[in-house]
Image (cartoon, helix red, strand yellow):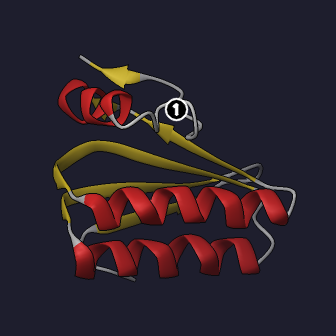
Amino acid sequence: MFDNLEVTKETDQCSILVKGEVSFKDAINLKECIFGLADDGHKKIVVNLRNITFLDSSGIGILLNSQRYLAAKKGILELQNIKSEIMEVLKIAGLDKDLNIVNVAT
């Protein structure tokens, strides 16, 4: 699908392993992937961020918009393995409470 995204479809959820940077271009690819899975009827999408090296504001915006998009479709976007440095930025911006974060990588 996209070079830095690895999608696994399971019975009850889809998982997306994100690799490398999530800057503007990559964020658009991530949005297309998430929205496409939601449009195909997948109700739970897990985004695993353990292998990202960079996340800019466009990436954060895509995660927020994707979560809202899934919620409107009665679905769930779950973020896993967020690096502590990124989690710190989300906390400072007050966005940690707006995102469905399951666990933080240490």
Density class for disc 1 (Cα within 10 Å; few <14, some 14-19, many ≥20) is some
Residue drawn at 45 percent across, 66 percent down: 62
State which quarter of the image contains the C terminus: top left
Residue 83: x %, y % from top left: 25, 31
Residue 38, visible in the rendered structure: yes
Q: Is residue 49 above or below residue 29?
A: above
Q: Quadrant of residue 98?
A: top right
What residue is at 77 percent from the left and 49 percent from the top?
12
Q: Residue furthest right?
A: 74
Q: Position of residue 19 (x, y in %)?
A: 22, 57
Q: Quadrant of the N terminus?
A: bottom left
Near-viewer residue (103 or 40): 103
In depth, the one of 19 and 70 nearer the eye is 70
Residue 2 percent across, percent down from the top left: 33, 80
- Residue designated by label 1: 101
Amino acid at circle 1: Ile
Left/right placement of residue 86 relative to residue 8 reads left
